[in-house]
Image: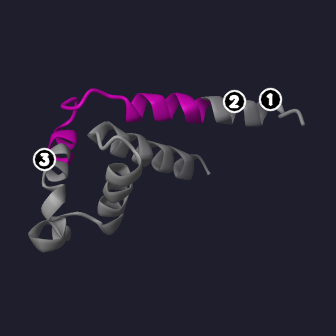
Amino acid sequence: MMLNKKTSYIIFITIFLVIISGFRPIGFDKDSISYVAMLDTYSTFFTSNFLIAEPTFWLFEAFNQNFLDGTPRNIFIIYAILGVTLKLF
């Protein structure tokens, strides 16, 4: 099945934006440093740290720790994929 030009452009733009937003250097913006600091406290998130971030943050971090390599970069990539895709729809 061939994609039409418009769909092909949208897919290309989506991939391009995900790469730009998901692979920015940590520290490029102030938020990324804060998120990495929260991820460093992952082992105690059920106690005091669970309430300082949204539940999907901890869900994605649990997935990252159990099924991926556990690096903060994966969280940024997951959010980039979700954010860019949802915004383009």
The boundaries of the magenta stretch are 13-35
- In the image, is residue 46 above or below residue 62? below
Residue occupying the point 59% across, 31% down:
13
Mark 2 residue element: helix
- Residue bearing the label numbered 1: 5
Amino acid type at mark 2: Tyr
User: Which mark is in front, 3 or 1?
Assistant: 3
Picture disc at residue 76: none
- Residue bearing the label numbered 3: 37
Mark 3 residue element: helix
Mark 1 residue element: helix
Residue 79 placement, left or right of 35: right
Amino acid type at mark 3: Ala
Residue 9 placement, left or right of 28: right
> Is label 1 in contact with label 2 (beta carbons under 8 Å)?
yes
The crowd level at tag 3 (other Cα within 10 Å; few <14, some 14-19, many 20+) is few
- Residue bearing the label numbered 2: 9
Residue ranking furthest to the right = 1
Q: Does the magenta stretch include residue 89?
A: no
Residue 67, percent across and down? 41, 50
Q: Which of marks 3 and 2 is nearer the N terminus?
A: 2
